[in-house]
Image (cartoon, rainbow, N blue to C red):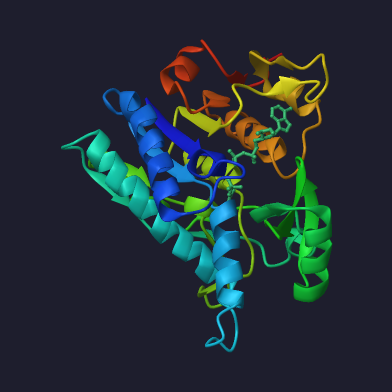
Amino acid sequence: MRILVALGGNALLRRHERPDAAVQQANARRAALALAPLFAEHEVVITHGNGPQVGVLAVQSASDPHLSTPYPFDVLGAQTQGMIGYWLLQELHNAVPGRRVAAIINQTEVDPADPAFTNPTKFIGETYTHEEALELATTRGWSVHPDGDGWRRVVGSPQPREVVETDLIRLLLDSGAIVVCAGGGGVPVVRDGADRLHGVEAVVDKDLTGAVLARALDADALLVLTDVPAVLRDYGTPQQAEIGEIDAASLRAMRFPAGSMGPKVEAACRFVEGGGKFAVIGSLDDPIALLDGRSGTRVTAPALG
Ligand SMILES: Nc1ncnc2c1ncn2[C@@H]1O[C@H](COP(=O)(O)OP(=O)(O)O)[C@@H](O)[C@H]1O
Ligand SMILES: NC(=O)OP(=O)(O)O
């Protein structure tokens, strides 16, 4: 099978962990070892999140006295692709010696008129207390929003239209390589009337880009890997329970939070509605069990008729 794996930001940096390089590389190692059983039998493309990391780089850039202007979010997104791509490249090499592995910088085309530019929903960076978040909103002009038990910065996250380098990714896959690409949802770019690309200030959702790329590559399955074993119905209540197999229409009828489970559910639904065989949302721990239907939430196309 051809499989697109969307690796959650939490897999690389767990909540409340320090964003030190050694911490993240150890998490990349854990992810590479967990994914290793997939590579023997399947063609695998890996995309990854960058929310925590792009926020850290934004704070660093904004506090550098030598810069007249902080680096914009397209540049920061490319930096995270290089950094996280490097960790995954090395750890995949070590986990599956002898396999060809590529990690590439990608651009994702978005609509310059996307309303998400003025309605920020994408969580980035660290978690703050409410008081800290209000202070940062006032002094730095950030938009902030509650996330779990804390508050985080939010930025615009336009819908991905197309991964610009899709043909190159297909060539690499066809050559037998494991491909790490479209990290952080891809560097957001817009196309002008002369067919030229320009970076824009945003952070694209990697699960939604994963769905677009998986369809474009004719992938059989989309695996959305995160820090919960499955999508939960009645989340956060005493009645919460894992959803096993479900069709996209039934899943769409439920409501999920915009900055976390919402995009994962949306990505899974779009993938199967667009012709993909199935998508699974679940934990990184055992991807084979997700593929076999032994764990996770398996999303299928709505039954015909
Ligand atoms: N209905 C739900 N079922 C499971 N998890 C949910 C649900 N609603 C919200 N969540 C939250 O979504 C989180 C996963 O989303 P997110 O933090 O964006 O993941 P990642 O960074 O791995 O991409 C879970 O840790 C959980 O806290
Ligand atoms: N870009 C992105 O979707 O990052 P996270 O998965 O870390 O939110």
Give the quarter of the figure containing the C terminus. top right
Name which quarter of the figure residue 46 lies in.
top left
Rendering coords of residue 60 (x, y %): 56, 71
* Callout count: 0
Can see residue 161?
no
Rendering coords of residue 296 (x, y %): 57, 19
Q: Is residue 278 above or below residue 96?
A: above
Horizontally, is 236 left or right of 34 in the view? right
Rendering coords of residue 110 (x, y %): 62, 60
User: Which residue is painted at 35% across and 50% down in the image?
Assistant: 87
Rendering coords of residue 191 (x, y %): 56, 70
Horizontally, is 100 left or right of 42 in the view? left
Nearer to us in this view, 75 or 298: 75
Can see residue 250?
yes
Q: Is residue 218 above or below residue 247?
A: below
Q: Is residue 211 above or below residue 185?
A: above
Name which quarter of the figure residue 254 lies in.
top right
Nearer to us in this view, 2 or 101: 101
| Residue found at the very far left of the displayed protein | 98
User: Which residue is painted at 44% across and 47% down in the image?
Assistant: 23
User: Which residue is painted at 61% across and 76% down in the image?
Assistant: 62
Nearer to us in this view, 147 or 16: 16
User: Which residue is painted at 45% across and 27% down in the image?
Assistant: 220
Q: Is residue 37 above or below residue 196?
A: above
Horizontally, is 255 left or right of 242 in the view? right
Give the quarter of the figure containing the N terminus. top left
